[in-house]
Amino acid sequence: MPRILKAPYVNAVVPPISVSSAYYFQDTEEFRRYKEGELAGGRYGRYDNPTWLEAQAQLALLEGAEAALIFPSGMSAVTNTVCALAQQGDSILYTGCAYRNLRTFFSEHMSRFGVHAHAIDQAHIEQFNAEFSRLYDPKTCSLVFIEMPSNPHMYLVDIDHVRSVIDPKRTKIVVDSTFASPENFQPLYHGADLVLHSCTKYLGGHGDFLAGCVCGDTGTIEKIQLYRNVSGAVSDGMSAFLLSRSLSSLPVRMAHFNKSGLEIATALEANPLVSRVYYTGLKSHPHAALAQKYLSGHGGVLSFELDCDKDEVMRFVDALEVPFMGTNFGSHHAMVEQCAEFTYYKLSDAERADIGITDTLVRMTIGLHDPALILDDIDRALKIAKSTPGVVPVKAAATSPRITRTGSMVGQFSI
Ligand code: PLP
């Protein structure tokens, strides 16, 4: 049955959002032309979507890649990429201080499919390099997976060293650079084969959807796409649109995060109640030299140790009035967590110690607020944390800061 071909308002500045599950053809002849590549268009919503294509083209451009794919979350970008490229009997080397679910995927799930993943702690560069050279087997190693900067300590890896050890015909270097964004780090330029992101974070930037992406050469991306067609890990048109919209403002948002992040990190380092700050923009970061080599900015997430006991840190987090207690980063919202009590509460003490998660470690994402607002809030909350419990009211239920935060958000942002 002939249908009307629609193309009104093709001159819209913002492209339309495609939510169609399917695409139609006028007749078998038209479909033949599609099959033979004479006609562009879609066939079915799990394979094609013009709104994805828009976001994918933007991502490829941002990373200097030939092609990109989007996924419904950062984790699905990781799992689809690894499953598409690893074979039974392969080995994978990955950075041990990495996002919790990445480690679970490698340590618990890949082994079920006969892929042996080995974690290498990247807190100490020399040790990492030595261990990497020792464990790398060109006969089996198909992937080196590097989270860089790592979550939450911002540890880095010398990609040049990794590149000098591997056989590039056998092994691909995959970098998860969610913590940096393409504004601050260009892994493909530095010798990685693929770069991944949780777009839920900086790239999405508004905390209102989940997405992931992988960028690289056309051949590898096509291979991952064939796997995505089967796994069904596809984004929806609305999320793809939101991502595309957000990417346009990424440079402005990252400029704010880089400037304010450094300002807050520097002030925290000078605070006597803060015993250590993990921020790659500071000279005190253990990987500051690598940061100079690989990063052009350091973003809006800071991890720091307080000179407090565990309960005082809890009181500090509870007393903060600007950030939400929660575990996202890279959006305009400020968020804070006592890492051991929030993201890592299911791990044993020994497991937490193994990856450097102490009871006094706090991770804060600064949002798009004026840094002075965040610093005042931290100073005030530290005073409360150090006061005698019960004497100073930490938080009155009727004036929950979380409610105030939501209500008074507008006008607090400096851009
Ligand atoms: N990679 C890193 C470095 C992360 O921090 C996260 C989540 O926090 C992910 C991947 C997973 O992303 P998503 O939550 O979008 O699945």
Image (cartoon, rainbow, N blue to C red):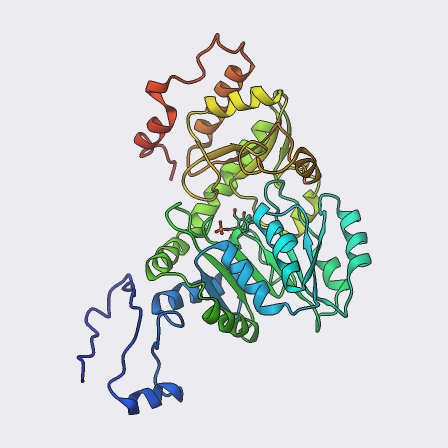
Looking at this rendering, what residue extends furthest in the top direction? 391
**7 on left or right of 111:** left
Q: How many marks?
A: 0
For image coordinates 29% across by 88% down, the residue present is 30
Q: Is residue 64 visible?
A: no
Q: Is residue 226 above or below residue 33?
A: above
Give the position of the C terminus as an image quadrant: top left
Looking at this rendering, what residue extends furthest in the front direction? 112
- Most foreground residue, 340 or 170: 340
| Image coords of residue 49 (percent x, y) | 36, 69
**407 on left or right of 156:** left
Looking at this rendering, what residue extends furthest in the bottom direction? 29
**366 on left or right of 164:** left
For image coordinates 38% across by 72% down, the residue present is 48
- Most foreground residue, 216 or 63: 216
Q: Is residue 311 above or below residue 174?
A: above
Give the position of the N terminus as an image quadrant: bottom left
| Image coords of residue 53 (percent x, y) | 39, 68
| Image coords of residue 223 (percent x, y) | 54, 74
Q: Is residue 185 visible?
A: yes
- Most foreground residue, 351 or 358: 351
| Image coords of residue 100 (percent x, y) | 59, 46
Dividing the picture into quarters, in which one does residue 357 lie? top right
